[in-house]
Each structure stands twice: as C-alpha cells, then as structure tokens.
Amino acid sequence: MAYTTTRNLLADSQDFERWSVLGSGAAAPVVNNDFGQAPDGTNTADKIDFGDTSASSGNYSIAYVSASNLVIGTSYRASFYAKAATVSDVGSKIHAYFESTIEEFTLSADWQRFEFSQTATATSKNFVIGARGIKSLQPAFSALVWGAQLEPGTTATDYVRTVDTVGKDYGWYEPTEGTVFVDVTESNNKIGRVLNVFGGSSRIVDLSRNYGNWEYFKSSDSSTTTIGSYAEPSLISVAIKLDDYNSAANGSVGTPDTSTGQIPSADLLRIGDRFDGARTLNGHIKRLTYWPVRQADTTLQVITE
C-alpha cells in the first residue's frame, strides 16, 4: 500500500489545451492535445507550437494557468516535463515562471524535468510556460510538454495529475474529504469488495464487483447501482466529501449522492474486502493513489478511463 503526499496547486496539469494562451509580437501558442508519448508511457504529452520572438525583446508566446491558494512569503517548487518536438527544435529555449523572475531551460531530444523555486508574493499567480523575447530572441519552435506541478517547499516530489481541481494546503490525510484510485484485477469471477469507506462503524460508500459489473453502494438510501462493466484490469475510484460523494469505474461515473448529513467524517478505508470482512477480493491491486480532496466527477471519469 502506498499514498502520495504531493500537493499539486495547478489545475489541468497536463491538459494544456485548457490553459490560456497569449502572444504579443508573436503568434499565440497552438496546443496539439495528446500528441505523443509522455514520460509515463501514456499518449498524453501535448505538442505546443510557440511563436517567433526573434524580432524584439518585448515579444512573447506563452501558455498559462492560474495557481491559487498560495501563501505569501512561502517558497514553492515548480516543475514540468519537456523535450524538443523535432530535431530542428533541439537547443530551443523554453521559459517558465510564476513570479517576476523568468527561468530559462534548453530543450533536448530527451525528456527532462525542469524545476525551479520562487517565493509567492500574492495568493494567486499565473504559472507560465512559453517563449519570452526578453530572455532569448529566437524563431518559432515546438515542444512536447507534460506534467506541470507547483507545490510548497524546495523539492519537486512525484508528479500528481490534476484535471479541474486546484489543490489546497492540507496534510496527506483529510478526514472530511478525499479520493482513492486503484487499478484492480478481481480474478474469482464472482463478488468482491474493493473500496469501502467508513465513518465510525457505519459503511458510507463502497465499490464492488458483482460478476460482470461494478456496483456502487450509497449509505443514504442503502441503494446499489451498476456503474460500469467489469474489465481486466479495471480502473476504479471513490470520492467523498460532506454531502457529496461518488464512485467511478472504467470511465463510467455514478450519480453523486448529495444527501444532507452524509460523510461527516471518514475514519477507515478498507481495501480488498467487504465492510464486514465477508467477501474478500481474490485478485491484485496496483497503482493505489490517494488525494486528500474530493476530486470532481469529471476528474473521476478521466482518471478511470
């Protein structure tokens, strides 16, 4: 079992087509979504075509996303992965910043994780990746970019993807909200509980296999709903928050339960067994990831696809 303590304060951390783009004296960047293979082996790296900034130091071609919930005077570590899109792009300079100092990095043919630290001067800043003429006068170039992250401290930790949720400053565990994701193979072809969340001694929500389907249990009305077909392996997730919880399996998302008084405090997560220990998972679990925030339903869909 493992969990991540990373707090990524950026939304849409690898979906650059959802970032804002801007150009002055140069064309605004053009983002080609899921263009190539990312460092994790998935086809989720975006190709970004940056404009020509060679004519003037005032020219720029940038993509940016808001970083919120910053603490003034706190140091944050920024990081992102990038490589030259083609041989002719090798040696191009890519720039990044969220404060006034513009950091410069040189693209190579291989993936590199570029990192830098800056101190927040406001509670909300734009995290920028692009080409700035004030740092380098250069022609248009293209880069493969993936995995942007901003986190408290001076060390870049393991990358955690975000979709539409901006992180907040919390500990690794939050009793009032959270999201769990697992990659599971349940091999007995029958019934097995995989994810169960409890508050006190009461079962709040669970996600289980029932022969060919994944089923989602809600404590507010003790109902069980089929939310997706079983596949091998299956990607599943449970998300909880006060008066708002849901589950997802293989890209299918259940109907959120927003009944009043639900999930006052979750204090137990049972993995691979039913709430009463009667139906144990006969299979394997890997890639367990925990976020101390209730990820949005759109995020649940994306991470389980």
Image: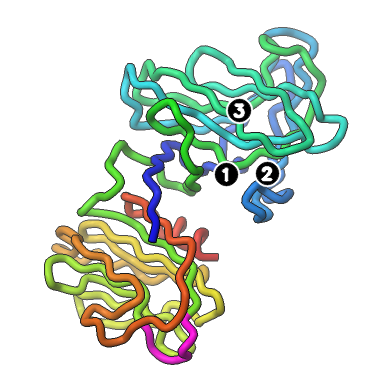
- The image shows residue 245, relative to residue 208, as above or below, that is above
Q: Tell whether 187 sits left or right of 203.
A: right
Identify the residue at horizontal 25%, vertical 82% (top origin): 277
- Other-residue count near label 3 (Cα within 10 Å), few / some / many at <14 / 14–19 / ≥20: many
The residue carrying mark 2 is 46
Q: Which mark is residue 163?
A: none
N-terminal of the pair, mark 1 or mark 3, is 1
Query: SS class of the residue under badge 1?
Result: loop
- Amino acid type indicated by mark 3: Ile
Query: SS class of the residue under badge 3?
Result: strand
In the rendered image, residue 98, in percent from the top left (x then y), is placed at: 49, 22
- The image shows residue 104, relative to residue 48, as above or below, that is above
Q: Which residues are magenta?
A: 186-192
- The image shows residue 52, relative to residue 242, as above or below, that is above
Is there CB contact under 8 Å for labels 1 and 2?
A: yes
- Amino acid type indicated by mark 1: Gln
- Amino acid type indicated by mark 2: Asp
Q: Would residue 15 be visible to someone looking at this image?
A: yes
The residue carrying mark 1 is 14
Does the magenta segment cover residue 104? no
N-terminal of the pair, mark 1 or mark 2, is 1
Q: CA distance from mark 1 to mark 2?
A: 8 Å
